[in-house]
Image: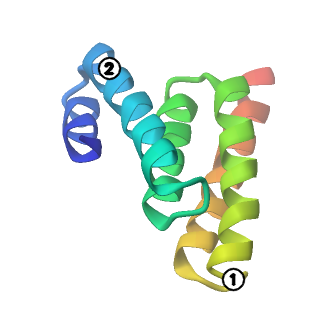
Amino acid sequence: MNNLAILYDKQGEYGKALPLFEECFKVNKNTLGETHVETLDSMNSLANFYSFQGEYLKALPLFEEGLKMRQVVLGEAHPATLATMKNLANMRKKQEEFRE
């Protein structure tokens, strides 16, 4: 489901991508739990989608929560933790540029 959402996103079919990103995150969270790696991956994908769409208020809590959970579950230096940290920093940078 997440891969199909990514494909739609890359094709510019955002209206098809968003419900899949949201559903994938919801299903993973309910089925696997909040701290499962797949749940954290789908949370990051959804946050990235929101960020790229300029929906920073929706992206921010997902990035922040995902970063906290990845730090606990995977550790501070894990590549996925660092990727989330980078995504959060990039989103904040875009947010600042948007304000200017």
User: Which x, y percent locates residue 3?
Assistant: 23, 47
Tell me the quarter of the image containing the C terminus. Answer: top right
User: Which x, y percent locates residue 46?
Assistant: 48, 38
Q: What kind of residue is marked 1?
A: Gly
Q: Which residue is mark 1?
A: 75
Q: Residues within 10 Å of mark 2 (few under 14, many from 20)?
A: some
Tell me the quarter of the image containing the N terminus. Answer: top left
Foreground pick, 87 / 17: 17
User: Which x, y percent locates residue 91?
Assistant: 66, 42
Foreground pick, 89 / 97: 89
**Residue 21 found in image quarter:** top left
Location of residue 6 with respect to 85 vertically, above or below: above
Q: Which residue is mark 2?
A: 14
Estimate the spatial distance between the alpha carbons at disc 2 and disc 1, rounded to whole Å.
Answer: 33 Å
> Could you tell me how many numbered marks the image carries?
2
User: Which x, y percent locates residue 92?
Assistant: 75, 42
Location of residue 99 with respect to 37 vertically, above or below: above
At a point 73% along the width and 25% down the height, the residue shown is 57
Q: What kind of residue is marked 2?
A: Tyr
For residue 41, which numbered disc appears in the image?
none
Which residue reaches farthest front? Answer: 31
Location of residue 51 with respect to 72 vertically, above or below: above
Instruction: Judge from the rendering whether residue 98 lies leftward or rightward of residue 5; answer left or right.
Output: right
Q: Secondary structure beneath disc 1?
A: loop
At a point 74% along the width and 74% down the height, the residue shown is 72
At a point 42% along the width and 60% down the height, the residue shown is 38
Location of residue 64 with respect to 97 vertically, above or below: below
Which residue reaches farthest top? Answer: 15
**Residue 18 found in image quarter:** top left
